[in-house]
Amino acid sequence: MKISGLLSEKANYNAQLKGDINAYLISLKANDIPSISMDMMIRELSAMGYTIDAESMVDLLSNSNYISKVTVDNIELDSKYNKSDKADKDVVRKLAVKTAKDKVKK
């Protein structure tokens, strides 16, 4: 296989991984879950068919808009999306529903 093909597959894999991680984080926020253990997140991703370790997850999530703090043990979701304001919760819930519907269509 050509190197360009391998690089293309890797880029596609990484894009799908980031998309699935963001969808999962959005669903956590929609359900008012403030944090998740790194082990649980890795198990969830493994169930989706991804192979990733904690250190790679830290690197991947370090620039996420949904994360306030990430370590090899725990992922804390950003509190600015966790306000008690009903409008903010509705926005997060709508994003989670839209993401879930988009995933079902694929």
Image: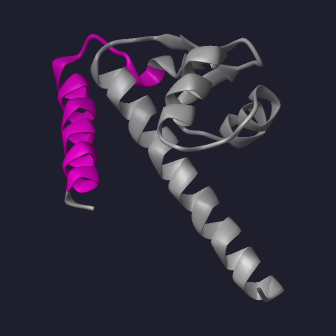
Identify the residue at horizontal 25%, vertical 43% (top origin): 100
Magenta stretch, overall SS: helix
For this view, does 1 lie left or right of residue 33?
A: right
Residue 63 picture location, percent across and down:
68, 41
When asked about the image quadrant of residue 43, the answer is: top right
Residue 17 picture location, percent across and down:
56, 50
For this view, does 23 lie left or right of residue 104?
A: right
Segment tinted magenta in the rendering: 80-104
In this view, 105 is above or below 71: below
Residue 21 picture location, percent across and down:
51, 40
Considering every residue shown, the one lying at the far front of the view is: 1
Q: How is the image coloured?
A: one colour
Does 81 lie within the magenta span? yes
Does 92 lie within the magenta span? yes
For this view, does 65 lie left or right of residue 26?
A: right
In this view, 44 is above or below 64: above
Quadrant in which the C terminus is drawn: bottom left
When asked about the image quadrant of residue 13, the answer is: bottom right
Identify the residue at horizontal 61%, vertical 27% (top origin): 42
